Amino acid sequence: MKKGLLVGVLALGAAMMFGGCGKEYANGEVVVYNWGEYINEDVIEMFEEEYDIEVIYDEFTENEDMYPIINIGEVNYDVVCPSDYMINRMINEGLLAELNYDNIPNIKNIDPTYLKSAEEFDPGNKYAVPYCWGTVGILYNKTMVDEPITSWSAIFDEKYTGEILMIDSVRDGMGIALKYLGYSMNTAEESQLEEAKELLIAQRPFVQGYFVDEVRNKMIGEEAALGVIYSGEAIYTQRENADLEYVVPEEGSNVWIDGWVIPKNAKNKENAEKWINFMCREDIALMNFEEITYSTPNAAARELIEDADIKNSTIAFPDAVTLERCETFKYLGETEEVYLEKWNEMKATQN
Amino acid sequence: MNKREGRLAKQNKLRQLLLSSPYVLWSIGFIILPLVMVVYYGLTSRDGGGFTLENLKLIWEPTHRATLILSVQLSVISTILCLLIAYPLALALRSLRLKSNGFVILLFMLPMWMNFLLRTIAWQNILEKNGVINMLLSAVGLPKLNIINTPTAIVLGMVYDFLPFMIIPIYNVLSKIGDDVIQAAADLGANYFQILWRVILPLSKPGIVSGLTMVFVPSLTTFVISDILGGGNILLIGKVIEQKFKMANDWNAGCGLSLVLMVFIFICMAIVQKYDKDSEGTSVW
């Protein structure tokens, strides 16, 4: 009863949003759960028309918001788009259904490099199809620094006191410190984590603040010289402020992949696979890329990009050498709490 | 006669039950039940679910203790600032003796009609390095202020957001103190400060107490203001609890810390109330 009501409300919302009020769909529905502002909305309508399937579209802001909802299973989502380490966790906890690739022929469009990267968290590519990907790096204002930035050392440099925007995310923040120290971003070694914490404590006096989404606007508004940011945001900031430059530091960084997965309790698995297949189609992937500017793993779509600057942008499509230095996050189980603990110890230090 | 009274009483009881039932249902569903769940999670262990006090003891971890102390410091400072601003203002408003005090109340309520998040984000833009205040300062050749992302900015945000909760109860109480009481005190030779200290202040205590509560509690538990104006620099206990739920996915620890915080608030309030009652005994009445 409760479930029916909730889905009903969602359906009503979707119906009002896309003006499909009262329309009958011959092939049922598909309930999609994606990140906010992470799709070109025209694509949803195109899917509805082509497949005669009603799309009930819902959004989340963080992996951690999405996880309990899928875990409790109160609402039956058919297709969800979590990040790498979360997919890893959901596989381990048996929350996902294996994909039937017979229904996803467009997988051929996905660059094998990314499928290989995805194997780090989804061995055999059994559960997830890459949707978007990117790196974490430094966005800097060329007029406010006196040398080209190439290393994480810049954000640990006293010289830039008050000019550094650090990322306010436990795994990313700790990961950067670990990478700078030459360790893995997925380490479980207590001593390495402790070292990373000490480094971050030493960095604290130089940092203007810890942010996630605000970095974009603050860098455009020249509030700081250096900021840690996701690559997908970097292209947008450069359009707004030509002095900004993005770099993946030489010590390496995090490369993340968000992928489509199907929860075990999905009611419309075949429709979900049709959705995933549709998302992999080159023209659709291109439409999405142009709207959200996050890198697409779709090789066929990249070929279709007309703007040569973007097609060959090292921000959107870093070269293989850069990527080789990067790691994806893995779900670390109990160790995740040690990361959080160290991060909070750093945050609670007044120096 | 007796029979009739009995029937009336019965009717009264029924009416009470009917009238209160919407709220009773509401409070069972949305106050008591969640509270029971918080207590249950807070007192059970994460694996297995046996009874434990471990979640409460978490507050003694240095990180958590430090964030609690900092939260208390900041919320006490902002509560006192609110009181210092609100009380004289309420006094001034009272002496204005406005015919329609609705207008005055409206002035304080008006900003509250806008979303609280929006107003806090506005403060961020005002205080920023290249924000409104610093633009004005540098326009007249003064050095820039560095307020954003410091505890000062958080206190400022708290005072701004919660000030109406202090003004309104104090103003309500003050406006109900009759002029005759004050005139009587003046007749008996009290000067203005004696009237203020020995008559008005004791009489307005209920307003002060409810103002203190309404400012202190949200200040102590906020994590939004510290996020927006503190730039992630200042970790408060509210944020730690949020992280326990969302990041660590450890509801038991989150509930345990919430319980400690609740007990802490109860104790603070009990002290204020007790002081209030004590002083009533020694007042002129």
Image (cartoon, coloured by chain):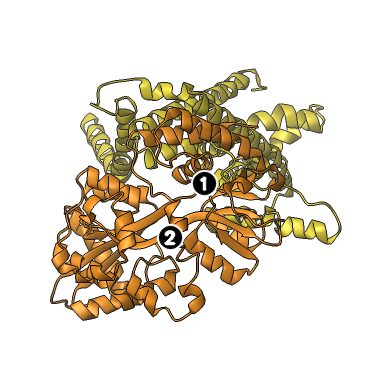
Q: Is residue B190 above or below residue A206?
A: above
Q: Nearer the viewer, residue A53 or A216?
A: A216
Quadrant housing the N terminus of chain A: bottom left
Does the image show residue B164? no
List x then y, in percent, for residue B224. Answer: 52, 46
* Residue with the mark numbered 1: A168
Q: Is residue A343 left or right of residue B247?
A: right
List x then y, in percent, for residue B13. Answer: 27, 37
Q: CA distance from mark 1 to mark 2?
A: 28 Å
Q: Is residue A287 above or below residue B111?
A: below
Indicate the chain coloured orange by its letter. Answer: A
Does the image show residue A139? yes
At x 20%, y 51%, the residue is: A96
List x then y, in percent, for residue A265. Answer: 16, 53
Q: Secondary structure at mark 1?
A: loop
Q: Which numbered disc, 1 or 2, marks the residue closer to the eye? A: 2
Amino acid residing under circle 1: Asp
Amino acid residing under circle 2: Ala
* Residue with the mark numbered 2: A320
Q: Is residue B99 left or right of residue A84?
A: right
Precedes in sequence: disc 1 or disc 2: 1
Using the rendered view, name the quadrant where residue B137 is placed: bottom right
At x 37%, y 32%, the residue is: B255
List x then y, in percent, for residue A3. Answer: 19, 54
Q: Label 2: chain?
A: A
Q: Nearer the viewer, residue B181 or A250?
A: A250
Indicate the chain coloured yellow by its letter. Answer: B
Q: Label 1: chain?
A: A
Q: Residue furthest right?
A: B141
